[in-house]
Image (cartoon, grey):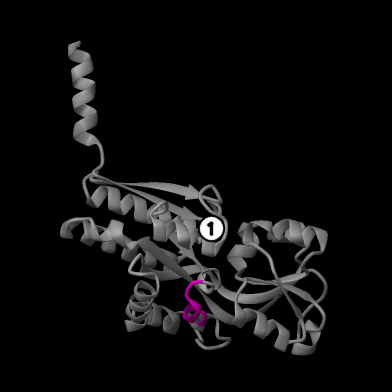
Amino acid sequence: MSISTLIVGFSFAAFAADYNLRLTANSNDQDEDYDGAVVFKNYVEAASNGAVSVELFIGTQLCSKGAECLQGVSDGSIDIYISTSGGAAGVFPYVQVLDLPYLMSDDRIAEDVMRSDFVRTVRKMALADSGNSIRLMTIGNTGGWRNFANTKRPIKEPSDMEGLKIRTVVADLPQVLVKALGAAPTPIPWPELFSSFQTGVVEGSKNGITDIMNMKFPDAGLQYVTLDGHAYMGALWWMNNAKYQSMPNNIRKVITDGFYALQQATFAS
């Protein structure tokens, strides 16, 4: 074996990460989820001195729907996954509390809630309900506040919603809200929403301004937005608990601090 081969082999062994984390977000690189993931990756890799590496899978490479992605977190094929409350509601129904309309009035109140015992309570509930396999690490923001937007007409009062096909997730609370306003809730996976606007499968959605613009929904016909801010768009960051628990205390602290940095970055965005 040559000296150069030995040097290359030694260098790889010296700098290879002890822990590799596979992180997925069903969004794109223009989204707050991606921004948060990059902050987490940069912080953790630097603060661990390379002991932890983070691979980012942005889009639907590893999974495409909330229940599927959370199953991946549970079985360990995915280490970290970010969902909305609606995306996780099929597995953890109580996270829909974040979608209660007009529950929180502004960013300050919402961010105080996301830093409070509320998160620790949901973490305990999710661990218990997942057989100790899925751990809620933090709740940040993904898209600001939900607003009603559609392709057909301005919405100035509830009766203007009558008959519109509004995209929702497969969760009870958002569908009940849309029905109560006289519209037709239509569950559509997020990656299919652009084409669904184009084809008329749906005529509206409940999304934040940044999501609407980053996904270029106006190009698909979305023209009218009502800035009612009816729900805070919480981003729930989940991690495989066995992976987290397998790490020594100093590395766990780096991971926890990385999620705090991520949360603050998504709040600021």
Residue at 77% over, 86% down: 182
Q: How busy is the neighbourhood of tag 1: few (under 14 within 10 Å), some, or many (20 plus)? A: many
Q: Can residue 178 be seen from the camera position used here?
A: yes
> Seen from this angle, which residue lies furthest top?
2
Which residue was labeled with disc 1? 31
Q: In this view, does 99 lie above or below 84?
A: below
Find the magenta span and give its range: 91-96
Relative horizontal placement of residue 234, taking residue 12 as reference (left or right): right
Q: Is 139 placed left or right of 97 in the picture?
A: left
Identify the main secondary structure in magenta. helix
Q: Position of residue 109 (x, y in %)?
A: 43, 84
The answer to which of 127 and 108 lies nearer the viewer is 127
Query: With respect to residue 64, does 10 lie above or below?
Result: above
Q: Position of residue 225 (x, y in %)?
A: 71, 74
- Residue occupying the point 50% across, 83% down: 97
> Residue placed at 53% from the left, 47% from the top?
61
How far across and down, in percent of the image, does residue 245 sit?
Answer: 24, 61
